[in-house]
């Protein structure tokens, strides 16, 4: 059964994230402090107010601020400061009624509609009727029937507003219902109600918080407006709207009277809006890898400072060669994700980045194009390309490189294609932007590119929308898009993962042909050692954010020197011939450690059977003894001499085997063989 995630961790994460956004926004922080002061002051008002709300001082009628009355007095000599804070608790509290009813009801209706198409039809029709009703007329009718019952009026206002909230929530709730983890929860036997509460509702949390802040501000204004026209709390009970109405009658002879209450109301409304805006600046899961402008400026400054502190390269790489030196990538705040990664990609060659999920392959690949997610940045090292250090390049510099010199093929081709436009429109637009061609020339170039990537019926595909073509065809279109600027380097992030075996072979054959025909180079991120053996000239094996072994593909696959590389080969069916295939493939005990849990020494030591006392200190990349290969293991030579290999089965059986047995075959020992 597929386990489902509890709601508590998600809520905790949301709380931390929301708090971070408020603290990161000056206006959001100021708004939070203002509301906190107002709530605290109003709840404690009976203990500290200098005057009672009904106390009158006829010697100071319509006075401005004085030592006795800090904000002045009204037409009856009542202290304005006392009346503002005495009425604040009820004003803020009844506004929260609108939030609870409006946002709560709207969210519940959206969850119900997202669960059932029939319910959606009924609820949508009802909310359409609610939105067409004149809210002011209904509220005035209720006041005429039951009097000025403010809590009831604000609750009815919440019901009317819930129709709009429902519209906002419905689209997002339906999108969350279509996620794969919701399907998994359904298979696991969770009821629709449990799925809505556990999986869909946490996804709506940010929208709920933002809408609550905005509706709170609307409730304040509506309540003040009703009191202004005489439908507020009964006299002599103070209210902000009633105080503004009284001040409006003395706007000429005592204009100060309007200022205190008006400013407090305005600041409270602005504070609620500021909180909503701060919480609304959440990064969303489907957003582009491009960071915000503020993050890009900060990152550019950090990169420029790092470049100034880094000594110049004596022998810059040749044109078309990528050279990565000591690259480190980390989260803003200090947590490293990739550390000290170095490799070279010669023109016309393919480098494979291999490793388990969470080893830093994608972060390394995205850093080559300056497309790291928001909050993640290059913290050290150099990415040398055509005489430039891309790690220190500004966003303006990267605009002239992305697409034209370095292009990206994403893991999911549909992410590169906009469903709103045809393939032809997207491809010709990219060509015109990158190559400065006219419309007719770009159309001919687009047709040629589709034919170049092996699409036979190219004219039909140009007129098709992304949803009208298959996954393999979409991947070919994505490759054509990447080639539209005639780049010299392709960064391919697992381009064959979502494809079947036949289409995968076709895509790999296509990439091989492109490398051969155009002389461009490729950085291939993959989990599949079969893909590595098929297309890659060089291999860099990554583990826990480090390169643990690199070198020529033949040397890595036939003479691996790092225990992690041995373990990967043992677990890969491509490394075994059909007649030698074991009945159970080897597995690697444990899992890749999280960045915050990386040890100071060898990061693979906890999972390695050969670990010893020499592995508790940092291990540098050392010559592996195979041509120009490097390995991060102090026992690499010992392993090579003794011919030891890791064989991890379900019973954790390990065995020494003769060194003369080829690596691809000596990794296939099973319990049956040993018996």
Image (cartoon, helix red, strand yellow):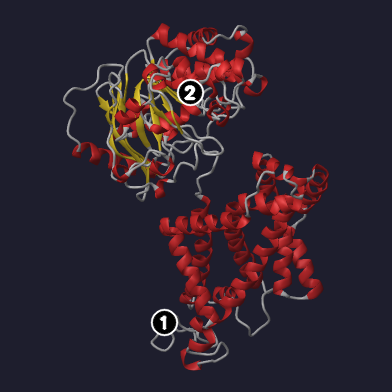
Residue at image point 54% right, 8% down: 447
For label 2, the residue is 529
The answer to whether any part of residue 39 appears in the image is yes
Location of the C terminus (image quadrant): top right
| Mark in front: 2 vs 1 | 2
Q: Is 384 displayed left or right of 375 in the figure?
A: left
Q: Is 358 displayed left or right of 369 in the figure?
A: right
- Residue 186: x and y in percent read 73, 44
State the image quarter where residue 417 is shown.
Answer: top right
Residue at image point 38% right, 87% down: 67
Location of residue 334 with respect to 149 vertically, above or below: above
Q: Looking at this view, is 312 or 232 the one in front?
A: 312
Location of residue 458 with respect to 628 vertically, above or below: above
Residue at image point 69% right, 68% down: 154
- Residue 366: x and y in percent read 41, 32
Please count the marks in the image. Answer: 2
Q: Looking at this view, is 181 or 620 the one in front?
A: 620
The answer to whether any part of residue 439 appears in the image is no
Residue at image point 46% right, 20% down: 664
Gap between marks 2 and 1 measured at Cα: 79 Å
Density class for disc 1 (Cα within 10 Å; few <14, some 14-19, many ≥20) is: some
Q: Is 607 displayed left or right of 458 in the figure?
A: left
- Mark 2, secondary structure of its residue: helix
Residue 31 circle label:
none
- Residue 491: x and y in percent read 42, 24
Q: Looking at this view, is 106 or 661 the one in front?
A: 661
- Residue 672: x and y in percent read 58, 29
For label 1, the residue is 65
Is tag 2's residue or tag 1's residue first in the polypeptide sequence? 1
Q: Is 594 displayed left or right of 193 in the figure?
A: left
């Amino acid at each position: 059964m597929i386990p489902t995630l509890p709601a508590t961790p998600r809520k905790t994460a949301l709380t931390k994230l929301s708090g971070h956004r408020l603290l990161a926004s000056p206006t959001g922080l100021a708004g939070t402090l203002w509301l906190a002061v107002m709530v605290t002051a109003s709840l404690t008002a009976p203990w500290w107010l200098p005057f009672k709300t009904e106390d009158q001082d006829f010697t100071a009628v319509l006075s401005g601020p004085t030592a006795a009355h800090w904000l002045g007095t009204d037409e009856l000599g009542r202290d304005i400061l006392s009346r503002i804070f005495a009425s604040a608790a009820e004003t803020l509290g009844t506004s929260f009624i609108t939030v609870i009813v409006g946002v709560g009801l709207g969210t519940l209706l959206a969850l119900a509609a997202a669960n059932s198409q029939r319910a959606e039809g009924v609820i949508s029709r009802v909310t359409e009727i609610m939105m067409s009703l004149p809210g002011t007329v209904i509220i005035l009718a209720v006041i005429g029937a039951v009097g000025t019952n403010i809590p009831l009026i604000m609750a009815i206002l919440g019901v009317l507003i819930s129709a709009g909230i429902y519209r906002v929530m419905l689209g997002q709730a339906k999108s969350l219902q279509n996620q794969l983890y919701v399907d998994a929860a359904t298979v696991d036997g969770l009821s629709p109600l449990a799925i809505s509460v556990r999986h869909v509702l946490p996804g709506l949390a940010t929208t709920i918080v933002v809408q609550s802040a905005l509706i709170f501000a609307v409730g304040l204004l509506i309540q003040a407006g009703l009191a202004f026209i005489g439908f507020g709390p009964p006299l002599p009970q103070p209210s902000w709207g009633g105080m503004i109405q009284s001040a409006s009658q003395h706007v000429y002879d005592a204009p100060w009277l309007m200022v205190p209450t008006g400013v407090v109301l305005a600041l409270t409304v602005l504070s609620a809006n500021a909180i909503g805006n701060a919480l609304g600046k959440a990064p969303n899961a489907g957003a582009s890898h491009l960071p915000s402008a503020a993050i890009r400026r900060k990152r550019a400054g950090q990169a420029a400072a790092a470049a100034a502190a880094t000594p110049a390269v004596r022998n810059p790489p040749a044109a078309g060669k990528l050279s990565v030196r000591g690259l480190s990538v980390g989260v803003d705040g200090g947590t490293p994700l990739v550390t000290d990664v170095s490799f070279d990609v010669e023109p016309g060659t393919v480098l494979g980045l291999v490793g388990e999920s969470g080893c830093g392959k994608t972060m390394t690949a995205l850093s080559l194009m300056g497309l790291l997610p928001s909050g993640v940045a290059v913290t050290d090292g150099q990415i040398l390309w055509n005489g430039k250090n891309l790690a220190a390049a500004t966003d303006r510099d990267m605009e002239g490189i992305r697409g034209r010199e370095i292009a990206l093929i994403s893991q999911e081709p549909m992410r590169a294609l906009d469903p709103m436009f045809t393939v032809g429109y997207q491809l010709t637009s990219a060509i015109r932007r990158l190559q400065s061609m006219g419309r007719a020339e770009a159309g001919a170039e687009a047709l040629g590119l589709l034919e170049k990537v092996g699409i036979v019926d190219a004219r039909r595909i140009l007129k098709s929308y992304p949803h009208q073509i298959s996954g393999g065809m979409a991947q070919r279109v994505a490759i054509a898009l990447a080639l539209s600027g005639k780049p010299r380097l392709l960064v391919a992030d697992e381009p064959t993962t979502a494809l079947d075996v036949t289409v995968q072979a076709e895509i790999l054959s296509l990439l091989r042909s492109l490398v051969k025909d155009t002389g461009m180079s490729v950085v291939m991120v993959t989990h599949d050692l079969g893909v590595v053996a098929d297309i890659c000239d060089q291999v860099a094996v990554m583990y826990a954010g480090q390169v643990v072994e690199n070198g020529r593909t033949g040397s890595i696959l036939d003479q691996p020197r790092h225990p992690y590389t041995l373990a990967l080969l043992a677990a890969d069916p491509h490394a075994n011939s059909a007649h030698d295939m074991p009945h159970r493939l080897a597995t690697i005990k444990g899992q890749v450690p999280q960045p915050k849990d990386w040890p100071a020494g060898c990061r693979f030591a906890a999972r390695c059977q050969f670990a010893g006392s020499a592995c508790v200190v940092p291990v540098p990349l050392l010559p592996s003894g195979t041509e120009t290969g490097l390995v991060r293991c102090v026992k690499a030579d010992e392993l090579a001499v003794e011919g030891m290999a890791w064989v991890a089965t379900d019973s954790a059986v390990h065995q020494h085997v003769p060194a003369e047995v080829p690596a691809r075959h000596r990794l296939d020992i099973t319990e049956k063989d040993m018996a």
